[in-house]
Amino acid sequence: MTNLALSLRSTPARRHFKTKTGQNNHFLITVLVGLDGVLDEKVDISPDFSTSWTPKDRVSSYHRSRQYVLESALVWITDLVDGYRAAIMRMPGLLPDSTITRINRLDGRANKLRELAKSLDMEPSDSELLIRAAYSWRNRVVHSSNSSERVSADLRARLLEATDRIHANYRGLDIEQYISNVEGTSAPTFKETASTIAAAQQLVEVIDASVTKRLDLEVFTESLIANYMRQRFENGRRSVFAEYWATDAAKTTARLRQLLLQDGLSPADNGVSKLSPEWIAEIVGFSAREARSRFMKEREL
C-alpha cells in the first residue's frame, strides 16, 4: 500500500495557468517585432490572407496596433490570475466554506486576491502589489467608460515603499510612472506589460506553494477519486467500481495510484506523504459496494 505514498507539488490550477502563460513574453515580443516591420514598411500582407490590408497611415496603424497588443496582453494575464484564484478557492480541503463565501462577496478582483492571500497567511509581496494595481489598469481598458480607476492609498504607499526592490527585480520598472499610467489614459509600455506578466507568474508560484503546504491532501484526493468515479458511473460505465476495487488489494492500489498520478499527484519525496497509512488502508480495503457508497454518497442514484 506504500505505492499510494503521494504528494501534490503543483495544483491543477497552476498547471493550467502555466499552460496558458508559458511563452507569453515570447509571443508578445514576436508580435511587436512584426509591428516594427510594418512601421518600417518591410512587411506587407501575404497572399494567404483572404482579406485586404491597405492602411492609409502606417504610423498611426502601428501605434494603435501596438497599444492594442500591449493592452490585450495585460488583460489576458490579469484575467488568468483571477481564474487561478477562483480555481484555488474551489479546491476541496483548502478553505472553510465561510471563508470562501466571505471572499466571494467582496467587490473587485484585487480585494479578492488580497483576501485569499491573507487567508493563506501571506503578507503582500511585490508581485501581488503589481497585480492588484494592474487590475485597475485592466478595468480601465475593458470598461473604457471608466477612465478614473485609482490605486488605493494603501496600495500606492506599499508600491512606493517597494520602489527600489521593484526597480531591481522588474527590469528597471519605474513604479511612480507605473502608477501614473495605471490611473491615466496611457497604454502600458512593453516594460510595464512584461513586468506584469512576470509578476503574475511569480505570484501564482508563491500562492501555489502555500496552497500545497496547507491543503488537506486526503480530502482533495478523495474528491479526485469521487469525481472520476461519478463521471464514469453516470456516463454508463456501471462496472467502474468493480474494476477498481477488485478482490486483490494490490491491484486496487495500483489502479488508484495510476488514476491519481494522471490527476497531478506525484510520488512523495523521500516517501513522506500527507496521505496517512490509515486513510490509504481504508480506501484500498473497500469492497466495490462500499466504494460506490462512499464516492456516490452526495448523488442520488
Image (spheres, rainbow, N blue to C red):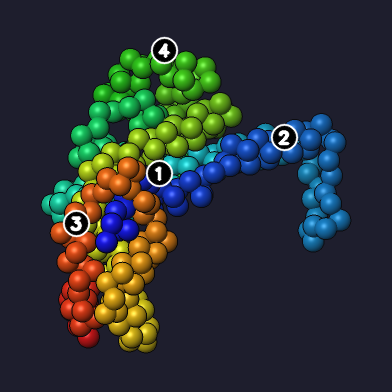
* Foreground disc of the pair 2, 3: 3
Q: Is residue 68 left or right of residue 291?
A: right
Q: Is residue 290 left or right of residue 51?
A: left
Residue 81 numbered tag:
1
Q: CA distance from mark 1 to mark 4?
A: 25 Å
- In primary-sequence order, the first of circles 2 and 1 is 2
Q: Is residue 278 left or right of residue 272?
A: left
Residue 277 numbered tag:
3
Q: As shown in the figure, which amino acid type bears the numbered disc 1? A: Val
Q: Is residue 40 above or below residue 99?
A: above
Q: As shown in the figure, which amino acid type bears the numbered disc 2? A: Val
Residue at mark 2: 33
Q: As shown in the figure, which amino acid type bears the numbered disc 4? A: Asp
* Foreground disc of the pair 3, 1: 3
Residue at mark 4: 164
Query: For residue 107, what is the image quadrant?
Result: top left
